[in-house]
């Protein structure tokens, strides 16, 4: 079970962990919130999750553009 958990945590977008760090809230509670609300509302939080993941990727891209590394 631990290997499966690590597999998904490494390959996920990191939205729940980022929210947990910012809000100082347990990550497992945030994940359960997304799962339960997805079942109750028939998938609408998935749109929110994907949009937050895209925002995180775009912010990372712009930060990388503003701070170029001289030697790769």
Image: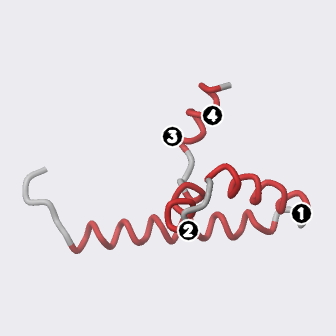
Circle 3 residues within 10 Å: few <14, some 14–19, many ≥20: few
Callout 4: SS: helix
| Numbered disc 2: secondary structure | helix
Image position, residue 27 (x, y; %): 61, 53
Q: Residues within 10 Å of mark 1 (few under 14, many from 20)?
A: few
Kindly indicate the quadrant of the structure image that contains residue 70: bottom left
Q: Are marks 3 and 4 in contact (CB under 8 Å)?
A: no
Do the residues bearing badges 2 and 3 touch, measured as CB atoms within 8 Å?
Answer: no
Name the front one of labels 2 and 3. 2
Q: Which residue is mark 1?
A: 42
Disc 2 crowd rating (10 Å Cα; few below 14, some 14-19, many 20+) is few
Q: Nearer the viewer, mark 4 or mark 2?
A: 2
Q: Residue at x 56, y 64 (%)?
A: 19
Residue drawn at x 51%, y 40% is 10
Q: Which residue is mark 2?
A: 23
Residue 28, image x, y percentages = 67, 49
Task: Kindly identify which numbered label has been placed on residue 6.
Answer: none
- The span from disc 1 to disc 3 (Cα, nearest Å) is 26 Å
Residues at marks 2 and 3, CA–CA distance in whole angstroms? 21 Å
CB-based contact (under 8 Å), mark 1 and mark 3: no
Q: Is residue 25 above or below residue 32?
A: below
Q: Mark 4 highlights which residue? A: 5
> x and y percent of residue 1 in the render?
68, 25
Separation of disc 1 and disc 2 at Cα? 26 Å
> For this view, does 49 lie left or right of residue 39?
left
Which one is closest to the eye, mark 4 or mark 1? 4
User: Distance from label 4 to label 2 (Cα)?
Assistant: 22 Å
- Residue at figure coordinates x 58%, y 69% from the top left: 52
- Find disc 3 in the rendering and name its residue: 10
Q: Residue at x 68, y 70 (%)?
A: 48
């Amino acid at each position: 079970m631990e290997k499966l958990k690590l597999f998904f945590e490494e390959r996920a977008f990191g939205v729940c962990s980022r929210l947990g760090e910012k809000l100082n809230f347990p990550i497992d509670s945030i994940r359960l919130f997304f799962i339960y609300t997805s079942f109750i509302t028939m998938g609408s939080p998935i749109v929110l999750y994907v949009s937050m993941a895209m925002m995180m990727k775009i912010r990372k891209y712009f930060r990388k553009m503003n701070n170029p590394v001289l030697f790769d």
